[in-house]
Image (cartoon, rainbow, N blue to C red):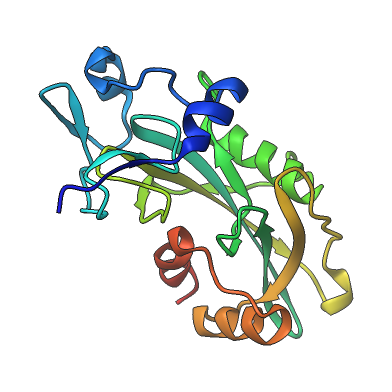
Amino acid sequence: MNITFTHPDVFDKGVREGWADPRTDPAQIDWTGRQATAAIPFEVIDGRPVNPCEKTGIRYGRNELGHWGEQLAADAIVTVDTKAGRWLVMVERSDGHGWAIPGGYVEPGEDPEAAAVRELEEETCLNLSSVSRQVLPARYVSDPRASDEAWMVTVPVRFNLAAGGCNDLPAVVGADDAMRAVWVHADSYDALVDDLDITYGGQVFRAHQAMLRDLLG
């Protein structure tokens, strides 16, 4: 079915707060620049962008996302290796989509690496601006808010902190659009899922599941 849907918040709250394209017709957008700077190439057919990686079930419109086409994000993957195992910083999203890696939109003209550092501090109060990190290749993420015409691509930035014991975990506090921030046991992806479920009754944000499986094993 060719379902058409854009959440009402996109037209109202999104436009007022500046995170949504004000144009309701994507054919009015000059796609040349957006295609040239896209992290993952995509087609535009009859003025409408085409998701390059999946069919989402929402053929037309933006679903819950504000932009048309690709939106670039950056995510901070922060781990600490202790005597008790490996731990990962995660935040509980305020939109009800579960537990995620700290991250968010890359602002126009902003470097994704800098965006990951900024978003991490905004959401967890953890400042790792002076800590060495590894910038990983941009990847498509299967975001539940996406459509066939609006999707997310993220640049993962990995920080691995050394520690000697469980008590050496840096303090994290949920802030901005994160309800809370915690260290989750993450020796493997399965261990992460189990800890979130048992300790917090939570689930991994769908957009981050494949990425965390790849990174944690």
The residue at 71%/61% (across/down) is: 161
Q: Is residue 210 above or below residue 10?
A: below
Q: Quadrant of the C terminus?
A: bottom left
Q: Quadrant of residue 214?
A: bottom left
The residue at 26%/54% (across/down) is: 56
78 to the left or right of 36 = right
The residue at 43%/22% (across/down) is: 21
Image location (x, y in percent) of residue 65: 44, 39
Q: Quadrant of residue 7?
A: top left
Image location (x, y in percent) of residue 135: 50, 45
Q: Quadrant of residue 195?
A: bottom right
Q: Is residue 182 above or below residue 56?
A: below
80 to the left or right of 6 = right
Q: Residue pushed farthest left?
A: 46
The residue at 34%/34% (across/down) is: 70
184 to the left or right of 101 = right
Q: Nearer the viewer, residue 16 or 55?
A: 16
Q: Quadrant of the N terminus?
A: bottom left
58 to the left or right of 46 = right
Question: What is the total number of numbered labels drawn onto the structure image?
Answer: 0
Q: Nearer the viewer, residue 2 or 109?
A: 2
Image location (x, y in percent) of residue 115: 60, 34
Q: Is residue 97 above or below residue 116?
A: below
Q: Nearer the viewer, residue 70 or 121?
A: 70
